Amino acid sequence: MDVMPQQDPESGRPPEPSPQDPYVMPAEGATAVPPPPPTLRTTLRRAAFGAVAAGVLLAGALVAVEDGEGDGPKEPGPVERAEAATTAGSPASLSDLTALIGDRQKWVETHPEDAPSLATLGTAYVEWARRSADTAYYARAEETLKRSLEARAGERGNGEAWVGLAALANARHDFLAAKRWGETVKKQQPKAWSVYPVLIDAYTGLGDQKAATAATEKFGELRKGVPALARTAELYRGQGWREDALATAREAADRATQPAEKAEALHRLGELAWERGEPEEAVAQFDAALRTDAGHHASLAGRARALVALERTDEALAAYQSALEKLPRPEYALELGELYESLGLDGDARTQYAGLREMAAGAKRAGVDESLLLARFEADHGDPDEAVELLRGQWRKQHRSAAVADALGWALHRAGKSEEGLEYAEQAVGTGVRNASYAYHLGMIQRELEDYGPARRNLEQAVRTNPAFSPLAAPLARQALEALGEPPPGGPGDMQPPPAPEPKPEPKPRREAERETEREAERETKPEAPAAPSKAPAPAPTASKEAAAGSAAPAEGGASKSP
């Protein structure tokens, strides 16, 4: 039901509710009324010119079919497109989302008890706030979703309002609340596919990889196609399975049909290329996303990040500034500030850092917890002790993702507690995610603790994964590697097993040893025998011979005979 004109994709806000605007229902069935029958004069005229016009009519018919101006189905409007995208589990373009919001606002003004429409409107507010960085819409979303539940309780079939509240909690980084709302819906409606995306986000934010994997698999069973492929690619990416993530993301991009869905898939390919240290490929994918959907402003920031790696600094600065103007997210202000700092433009950097603090404060007033981002900023550019406190609070909330573990480990290191920070940094890298910053942080902590072998290995991993992962940290990683130098010779790769020892002769039994001694003594004292020996009796044994033999039995062969 398209009652709003299509909005400009660059529009800053969706339409505000306006009670003065009348709600107008579109005409229905207008094209079903048959035209009046032709007159006799018209029929004769057509017959006279029929043979001449046959070819022209055929050509005109073909042109009409090609141009879509025949009696085919009506082209869907922005509201229908947004509804179709929502039904498929795909993102809608910002202009279509704006139209959907305007449509539902007008409808609920005259139908205030329509719980499904209120749930749709509240969820659309969440999506608008998330994709426009206008956090003021979160409060409006919460109010609208609560109105939906007042009109119809979740237990009476209004699970979509609960799903909307879970999406709102995820957007505010309250992952425990999102988990509770989502699991409530899953318990009542285990085959409702719409609950699984919010559960995946909640489990990921809590660092529960096992639950996130199970939810992703279930979503893939219930919702085939591009949405399931996109979620699966993100799962593989978080586990460090780069080849699988890339193959799945490419399939999602190939199968995407709607502009917003296609742009999101191309953006994901750009992110994967950036993480692999392939900035040229990343720029190409981000450019393709922007050509597909000019409203995909996150690709502006991704493009800026890749341009920095290509040393196209002026273009990168312009892209960052455009991204911040259209999508004022505090993480973009942090990245731009660090770029300025790397260029020696400390005044511009401080301006961006001040903007970051203002945006985070505004988000906090809207109920959004930006503790992770603020802690990352404080650890490197402010007060590391404050960063530690912020992140310990996150850990107590069970926000134990790889990102939080990495940030906490680094903040502890910066606050002079490297031994404690080592545990968290190892946990972040141990998740399997291939993140150059995580490897860099772990390597620097190990270097501080004089664990030089693992430090060298992790710093090499950071530089090898993405040589330009940060305009400030990447040069420091290379400097640390140079200071560590090459590993000493004879390392694990050059070591040979020691030679086997010579086998020792087994000791002879004591009795056998005594006999051998007796035989040796007998050979030493025995005179050389004459040619013709006499038969005289042998003399008694000498004292020396007795001493050698002791109490042993006589030697084999008997006593010698004297001549």
Image (tube, grey):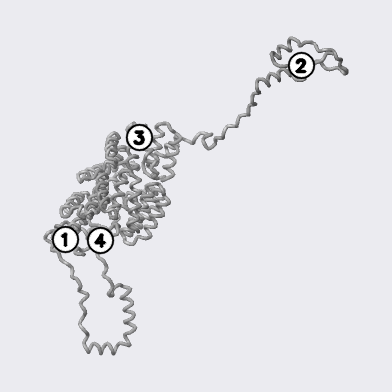
Category of crowding for the residue at label 1, using alpha-carbon neighbours closer than 10 angstroms: few (below 14), some (14–19), many (at least 20) = some
Label disc, if present, on residue 524 of the rendered structure: 2
- Can you name the residue that lies furthest to the left here? 20
Q: CA distance from mark 1 to mark 3?
A: 54 Å
Residue type, label 1: Trp
Q: Kindly report which numbered mark, 2 or 4, lies closer to the viewer in this rendering.
A: 2
Q: Which is more toward the observer, 102 or 356?
A: 102
Of mark 2 and mark 3, the one earlier in the sequence is 3
| Mark closest to the chain's N terminus, 1 or 4 | 4
In the picture, the disc for residue 421 is 3
Q: Nearer the viewer, residue 183 or 539?
A: 539
> Residue 538, position in %: x, y?
81, 13
Indicate the position of residue 272 as horizontal and vertical percent values: 38, 51
For the residues marked 2 and 1, what is the alpha-carbon distance in whole angstroms? 126 Å
Looking at numbered disc 3 in the image, what kind of residue is underneath it?
Gly
Left or right: where 136 falls relative to 210: left
Q: Which mark is residue 83?
A: 4
Q: Could you tell me which secondary element the residue under label 2 belongs to?
A: helix
Which of disc 3 and disc 1 is earlier in sequence? 1
Q: Quadrant of the N terminus?
A: bottom left
Foreground mark, 1 or 3, reads: 1
**How far apart are the two marked residues, 2 and 4, measured between alpha carbons?**
115 Å
